[in-house]
Image: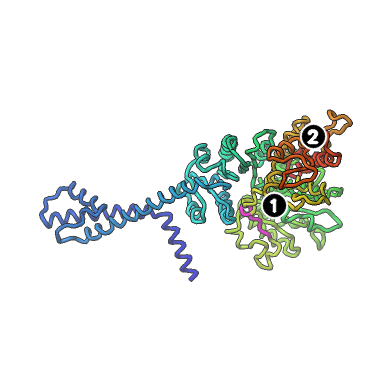
Amino acid sequence: MEKSMRRGKILRNLWADYSWFIILLLGSISLVLGYIGFWKNGLLNEAGRTSLDNLYLTLGLISLNSGAVPPPVGWELQIARFLVPAITAYTAFLAFTSLFIQQTERVRLWFIQDHVIICGLGRKGYRLAIQFLQQGTPLVVIEANEGNDWIGNIRASGGIVILGDARDPELLEKVKLNRALSLVSVLGDDGKNAEVAVLAEEISKTRKEGTLTCIIHIFDAQLWHLLREKELQAHQNYSFRLEMFNIFDRGAHLMVQGNPPWTEHRPDRPPHVLIIGLGKMGQRVVLETARGWQIHNPVSDHKIHVTIIDQDAENKLAALKIQHPRLEKLGSFQSFDIDIMTGEFDRIADHFQEGQNINLDLVYVCLDDETFCLQTGLRLNHQLRRHQIPTVLRMVESGGLAMLVGSEGSGGEAFNNLRIFDLLDQTCTAELLQGGTHEILARNLHAVYLENCRGAAGDDALVPWEDLSDYLKEKNRQQADRIPLMLKSVGCRIAPLQDWDAEKFMFQEGDKEEDDQIARMAKLEHEHWCAAKKEEGWKYGIEKDPDKKTAPSLLPWEDLPEPEKEKNKQFIRDLPRMLARAGFQIER
């Protein structure tokens, strides 16, 4: 039965790829047979028909108008007068079905709201689309390639697919961008994704309610790092929220956090990590490893040991240290310029041998080529077979070669220490919306609120983030949106994280308000909060009552009780730490 199912799938794929070619070929053959049949019939019946007459009669088979002729009827005409109408009917059915789908999707667009728009149906876009559909999220996909094989799967799963260029502002309005919850642009070009974001921001200015979260993918990791400042710009357009992601940065973070070296090392020494391949992914893994060691061991004087193998390891590591000077203080680095495909790599385990033991705790294999990555992991696994060193292999997706080993090290006892990290499967998920800068900041803001208000009663916000209402979650996001404006008011700005000690940034405090940056920002935040509450119909009341919309904190800053002022000030003091955890730093 399994063989027949596979055979059926192959036939369906062949038909999907070549159906129009087969229809065109059969149609041409049937018309030729029809012409020959009419020509022979005319000769036998001495009808005196010309070539144009026979052609006219042949074309008439399409509409069933010319098949009835005096006998004898040759086999060519017999086949043609059944095959031509059948092909015509099938083609008309396909055209009607396509038109019906298009019109149905247009009708659905009239009523759609709180939906997700995905621009681009490549591997990343398809994975995201399927996950959103499985969650029951209304989905619209914009795809330029009419022949994309995944379009049918998306429509069959309940999604709407609109053909066209996502950079067309009319098309973005057609898919009801101003009623959408999120827009995710994963086109195959960084410039195109940026264009979509600019258009979306402009269109969102006419949005009547809610905030559009626009998430764009930037493939170039260096460009992504430089552009991140755009995410937290100081502006007043609260109807638009920009997030950028890079699969290598996100993948490195998930790869290291899911397989951390600091849980594997012996207590008598810091962990020793081997990273093979210093491409886009490998460089981010180096940074994540060092940064993670700093976060998990803030008081430790020990440096994490990192050995790097690449064809140009020394030069790439030197460039990385120039970009991130803090690396030298956090890690002890050793590099080997080795071609993985040479025999020299087969003796690499000797560098870590210490008598009967081995000075190595974890291996990350980050080669770009899947075949080389798996081959390298297996070769190294053979060298270290007596020690069972955990080895994480970076693969593009869970299928293909990854299945030979199996996720979660399920490839048998010989491969128990091998772990597959599926880059696309791990990074292109519906949780992408929950992993952006604004979302991380909003969660941190809520955590600070819980800490500062511990013990208070009757507050529906004193629950974990997961149990928070959508309304209160959005209020936290809006507070995160205001952070750049507060910093700008005291001459500070947000920049992508370069200084890994950015958490220690200190605002100026003084007796006079003009000298006290914390008090000035806390006052500004309180004023923004009051304005937002009053706009929603809230007013001052001795007790907080959501039903009556009364709150005791709806007072001018000068009349606010000192404990309430301190809550706002503590929020400001925690900003450097929260921003650093989200990948940003404060600069004067």
Q: CA distance from mark 1 to mark 2?
A: 44 Å
Amino acid at circle 2: Pro
- Is residue 385 among the parts visible in the rendering? yes
| Residue at horizontal 41 percent and vertical 51 percent from the top | 100
Q: Which residues are magenta?
A: 419-425
Q: Residues within 10 Å of mark 2 (few under 14, many from 20)?
A: few
User: Which quadrant holds the C terminus?
Assistant: top right
Nearer the observer: mark 1 or 2; the answer is: 2
Q: Amino acid at mark 1?
A: Leu
Query: What numbered label is drawn on residue 254?
Result: 1
Q: Residue furthest top?
A: 514
Instruction: Compare marks 1 and 2 and give the one earlier in the sequence.
Output: 1
- As drawn, 399 above or below 575: below
The location of residue 281, given as percent across then percent down, is 67, 48
Could you tell me which secondary element the residue under label 2 belongs to? loop
Residue 135, quarter of the rendered image:
bottom right
Total numbered badges shown on the rendered structure? 2
Q: Closest to the observer: 180 or 435?
A: 180
- Residue at 50 percent across and 49 percent down: it is 160
* Residue 259 sits inside the magenta stretch: no
Q: Quadrant of residue 385?
A: bottom right
Q: Which residue is mark 2?
A: 556
Position in image of residue 497 (x %, y %): 74, 40
- Image location (x, y in percent) of residue 496: 72, 38
Q: Quadrant of residue 359?
A: bottom right
Q: Is residue 38 above or below residue 486?
A: below
Side (left or right) of 152 relative to 339: left
Q: Is residue 326 visible?
A: no
Q: Are marks 1 and 2 in contact (CB under 8 Å)?
A: no
**Is 112 on the left-hand or right-hand side of 475?**
left
